Amino acid sequence: MAVNDECKLRFRELKAKRIYRFIVFRIDESIHQVVVEKLGQSDESYDAFTDSLPPNECRYAVYDFDFTTDENCQKSKIFFVAWAPDVAKVRSKMLYASSKDRFRRELDGVQVEIQATDPSEMSLDIVKLRAL
């Protein structure tokens, strides 16, 4: 599965310029590429991010999570989310699972990976725990 150049460009913008809070990617089977589906602006919430993942289709996503440590330091970590809901088609889940590692390697700078089949597996509490 090829990765569209826009995916890498937008990820670099999220990482370096911080102009996006999140990016949602999908596999376009007609051109056999991972493409950008949605860009979340820097002021968008975590709920806006989770709402942008379809309830019955697989997606990849990255989220730039800002948090404060116990020592009161401001930090940021980039999360990679492999979203594969239980109700998604088996073929789609297989396609996303088999393409994930290659796509993830294209995104240099991801610090934490989450695989979720249900919204509860990527709740804000879980993200906070994984960030620390």
Image: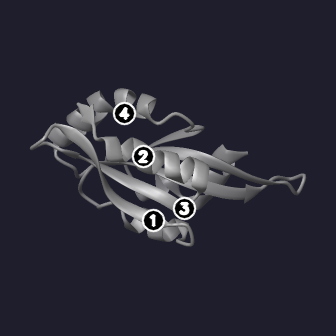
Q: Nearer the viewer, mark 2 or mark 1?
A: 2
At a point 13% along the width and 41% down the height, the residue shown is 31
| Percent coordinates x, y for residue 100 in the rendering | 35, 33
Residue 97 is tagged as none
At a point 49% along the width and 69% down the height, the residue shown is 47
Give residue 34's quadrant in the image: top left
48 relative position to 30: left or right: right
Tell which circle, 4 or 1, labels the residue nearer the N-terminal end.
1
Mark 2: amino acid:
Leu
Residue 9 is tagged as 2
Q: Nearer the viewer, mark 3 or mark 1?
A: 3
Report the Cα–Cα distance between label 4 and label 2.
14 Å
Residue located beneath label 3 in the image: 19
Tell which circle, 4 or 2, labels the residue nearer the N-terminal end.
2
**SS type, badge 4:** helix
Residue located beneath label 1 in the image: 40
Mark 4: amino acid:
Phe
